[in-house]
Image (spheres, helix red, strand yellow):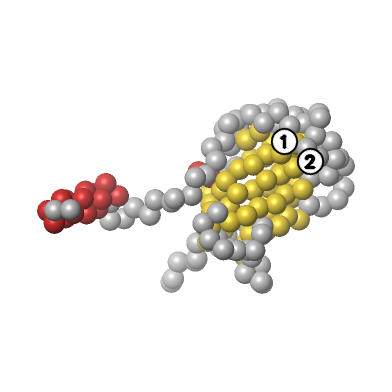
Amino acid sequence: MDVRLCWLAGVLAIVLTGCDSPPISACPVTQPNASLPPGEETASPDYLGNGDLWTVLWPEGRIVIEPGGPGEIRSDGSLAMKFPFWRGETAVGDLQVTGQRLDGAAPAMTAEIPEGYGDRGLQASALIFPSAGCWEVTASVGDHQLTFTTEVVVREAPDG
Protein backbone atom coordinates (compact mmCIF):
# COMPACT_ATOMS: atom_id res chain seq x y z
CA MET A 1 0.00 0.00 0.00
CA ASP A 2 1.24 3.51 -0.77
CA VAL A 3 2.87 5.25 2.24
CA ARG A 4 0.73 8.37 1.68
CA LEU A 5 -2.44 6.28 1.77
CA CYS A 6 -1.34 4.62 5.05
CA TRP A 7 -0.55 8.03 6.54
CA LEU A 8 -3.93 9.39 5.44
CA ALA A 9 -5.73 6.36 6.92
CA GLY A 10 -3.93 6.93 10.24
CA VAL A 11 -4.84 10.63 10.33
CA LEU A 12 -8.45 9.81 9.46
CA ALA A 13 -8.61 7.26 12.29
CA ILE A 14 -7.37 9.88 14.78
CA VAL A 15 -9.84 12.49 13.54
CA LEU A 16 -12.79 10.08 13.65
CA THR A 17 -12.05 8.74 17.14
CA GLY A 18 -10.73 11.92 18.72
CA CYS A 19 -7.88 12.04 21.21
CA ASP A 20 -10.12 11.87 24.30
CA SER A 21 -12.53 9.22 23.07
CA PRO A 22 -12.53 5.84 24.76
CA PRO A 23 -11.54 2.92 22.55
CA ILE A 24 -14.38 1.44 20.56
CA SER A 25 -15.33 -1.97 21.93
CA ALA A 26 -15.35 -4.99 19.69
CA CYS A 27 -17.88 -6.72 21.96
CA PRO A 28 -21.18 -7.22 20.05
CA VAL A 29 -23.41 -6.29 23.00
CA THR A 30 -27.07 -7.23 22.82
CA GLN A 31 -29.50 -4.36 22.45
CA PRO A 32 -32.58 -4.42 24.68
CA ASN A 33 -35.98 -4.81 23.03
CA ALA A 34 -38.14 -3.12 25.73
CA SER A 35 -40.31 -6.24 26.09
CA LEU A 36 -42.28 -5.82 29.33
CA PRO A 37 -41.82 -8.74 31.77
CA PRO A 38 -44.91 -10.35 33.32
CA GLY A 39 -46.13 -8.62 36.44
CA GLU A 40 -44.32 -5.35 35.68
CA GLU A 41 -46.35 -2.21 35.08
CA THR A 42 -43.62 0.28 34.20
CA ALA A 43 -42.00 0.03 30.79
CA SER A 44 -38.23 0.34 30.45
CA PRO A 45 -36.15 0.60 27.31
CA ASP A 46 -33.56 -1.64 29.06
CA TYR A 47 -35.76 -4.75 29.24
CA LEU A 48 -34.83 -7.75 27.13
CA GLY A 49 -37.30 -10.59 26.71
CA ASN A 50 -38.46 -13.28 24.32
CA GLY A 51 -41.91 -14.25 25.64
CA ASP A 52 -40.48 -16.93 27.94
CA LEU A 53 -37.72 -15.17 29.91
CA TRP A 54 -36.80 -11.54 30.57
CA THR A 55 -34.03 -9.52 32.20
CA VAL A 56 -32.79 -5.93 32.36
CA LEU A 57 -29.63 -5.03 30.46
CA TRP A 58 -27.18 -2.46 31.80
CA PRO A 59 -26.85 0.80 29.82
CA GLU A 60 -25.06 0.45 26.49
CA GLY A 61 -24.72 -3.29 27.15
CA ARG A 62 -21.88 -2.68 29.62
CA ILE A 63 -21.67 -3.80 33.20
CA VAL A 64 -19.40 -1.22 34.83
CA ILE A 65 -17.88 -2.17 38.17
CA GLU A 66 -16.45 0.91 39.89
CA PRO A 67 -15.97 2.31 43.37
CA GLY A 68 -19.28 3.62 44.73
CA GLY A 69 -21.26 1.95 41.95
CA PRO A 70 -23.35 -1.18 41.82
CA GLY A 71 -21.60 -4.51 41.76
CA GLU A 72 -18.49 -5.62 43.56
CA ILE A 73 -14.99 -6.90 43.10
CA ARG A 74 -14.71 -9.98 45.30
CA SER A 75 -11.64 -11.08 47.25
CA ASP A 76 -10.78 -13.65 44.55
CA GLY A 77 -10.89 -10.91 41.88
CA SER A 78 -14.20 -12.03 40.37
CA LEU A 79 -16.80 -9.41 39.46
CA ALA A 80 -20.38 -9.70 40.74
CA MET A 81 -23.45 -7.84 39.51
CA LYS A 82 -27.11 -8.30 40.39
CA PHE A 83 -29.53 -9.28 37.61
CA PRO A 84 -33.28 -9.85 37.86
CA PHE A 85 -34.89 -12.46 35.65
CA TRP A 86 -38.60 -13.08 35.02
CA ARG A 87 -40.17 -16.36 33.94
CA GLY A 88 -43.18 -16.35 31.62
CA GLU A 89 -46.28 -18.56 32.00
CA THR A 90 -44.71 -21.59 30.33
CA ALA A 91 -41.24 -21.18 31.89
CA VAL A 92 -41.89 -22.88 35.23
CA GLY A 93 -39.01 -24.21 37.27
CA ASP A 94 -35.56 -23.40 38.58
CA LEU A 95 -33.55 -20.70 36.83
CA GLN A 96 -30.05 -21.61 35.63
CA VAL A 97 -27.60 -19.00 34.33
CA THR A 98 -24.30 -19.77 32.62
CA GLY A 99 -21.82 -17.73 30.65
CA GLN A 100 -18.65 -17.88 28.64
CA ARG A 101 -16.10 -15.25 27.72
CA LEU A 102 -16.02 -14.52 23.98
CA ASP A 103 -12.85 -12.43 23.69
CA GLY A 104 -10.33 -14.47 25.66
CA ALA A 105 -9.71 -17.44 27.88
CA ALA A 106 -11.44 -17.42 31.27
CA PRO A 107 -13.25 -19.83 33.57
CA ALA A 108 -17.01 -20.02 33.04
CA MET A 109 -19.30 -17.38 34.50
CA THR A 110 -21.40 -18.61 37.41
CA ALA A 111 -24.54 -17.35 39.11
CA GLU A 112 -25.82 -17.10 42.65
CA ILE A 113 -29.55 -17.75 42.61
CA PRO A 114 -31.15 -17.46 46.04
CA GLU A 115 -34.02 -19.67 47.13
CA GLY A 116 -37.35 -18.30 48.24
CA TYR A 117 -38.64 -16.91 44.94
CA GLY A 118 -40.54 -20.04 43.90
CA ASP A 119 -40.56 -21.49 40.40
CA ARG A 120 -42.58 -18.75 38.65
CA GLY A 121 -42.24 -15.03 38.00
CA LEU A 122 -39.39 -12.87 39.29
CA GLN A 123 -36.07 -14.41 40.31
CA ALA A 124 -33.20 -12.34 41.71
CA SER A 125 -29.65 -13.42 40.93
CA ALA A 126 -26.05 -12.30 40.97
CA LEU A 127 -23.88 -13.05 37.98
CA ILE A 128 -20.24 -13.77 38.85
CA PHE A 129 -17.74 -13.00 36.10
CA PRO A 130 -14.19 -14.33 36.64
CA SER A 131 -12.76 -11.39 34.66
CA ALA A 132 -13.60 -8.29 32.68
CA GLY A 133 -14.30 -8.83 29.00
CA CYS A 134 -17.00 -9.73 26.51
CA TRP A 135 -19.42 -12.36 27.88
CA GLU A 136 -22.25 -14.39 26.40
CA VAL A 137 -24.82 -15.16 29.11
CA THR A 138 -27.60 -17.75 28.84
CA ALA A 139 -30.48 -17.98 31.31
CA SER A 140 -32.63 -21.07 31.12
CA VAL A 141 -35.68 -22.61 32.74
CA GLY A 142 -36.26 -26.10 31.36
CA ASP A 143 -36.25 -25.81 27.54
CA HIS A 144 -36.71 -22.01 27.60
CA GLN A 145 -33.61 -19.86 27.05
CA LEU A 146 -32.64 -16.20 26.87
CA THR A 147 -29.14 -15.38 25.64
CA PHE A 148 -27.44 -12.00 25.57
CA THR A 149 -23.94 -10.58 25.17
CA THR A 150 -22.58 -7.99 27.57
CA GLU A 151 -19.27 -6.32 28.20
CA VAL A 152 -17.89 -6.31 31.76
CA VAL A 153 -15.66 -3.32 32.54
CA VAL A 154 -13.75 -2.40 35.70
CA ARG A 155 -13.04 1.26 36.42
CA GLU A 156 -10.55 2.08 39.13
CA ALA A 157 -10.95 4.97 41.56
CA PRO A 158 -9.28 8.14 40.26
CA ASP A 159 -6.05 9.10 42.02
CA GLY A 160 -6.11 11.95 44.41
Residue at 31%, 55% in the rendered image: 20
Number of numbered discs present?
A: 2
User: Which circle's residue, 1 or 2, is located before the other in the chain?
Assistant: 1
> Would residue 27 be seen by someone viewing this image from the given angle?
yes
Real-space CA distance between mark 1 and mark 2, rounded to the nearest whole angstrom: 8 Å
On the image, the x and y values in percent for residue 98 come to 70, 52
Residue tagged 1: 53
Res. 89 image quadrant: top right
- Horizontal and vertical percent position of residue 158: 45, 66
Who's the residue at 13% across and 56% down the image?
Answer: 3
In the rendered view, would you say 7 is above or below 59? below
Q: Is residue 118 left or right of residue 71?
A: right
Residue appearing at x 44%, y 50% in the figure: 26
- The reply to whether the C-beta atoms of the residues labelled 1 and 2 are less than 8 Å apart is yes
Classify 10 Å Cα crowding around label 1: few (below 14), some (14-19), many (20 and above).
Answer: many
Residue 63: in sight, yes or no? no
Where residue 79 appears, as percent x and y from the top left, is: 62, 61
| Front tag of 1 and 2 | 2
Decide which of 144, 48 is in the foreground and name it: 144
- The C terminus - image quarter: bottom left
Disc 2 on helix, strand or loop?
A: strand
Q: Determine crowd level at label 2: few under 14, some 14-19, many 20+ residues with C-alpha closer than 10 A.
A: many
Amino acid type indicated by mark 1: Leu
* Secondary element at image label 1: strand
Q: Amino acid at mark 2?
A: Val
Residue 76's disc is none
In the displayed structure, 22 sits above or below 138; it is below
In the image, is residue 57 above or below residue 81?
Answer: above
Name the residue that disc number 2 marks: 141
Residue 144 lies in quadrant: top right
Left or right: 33, with 1 as reference point: right
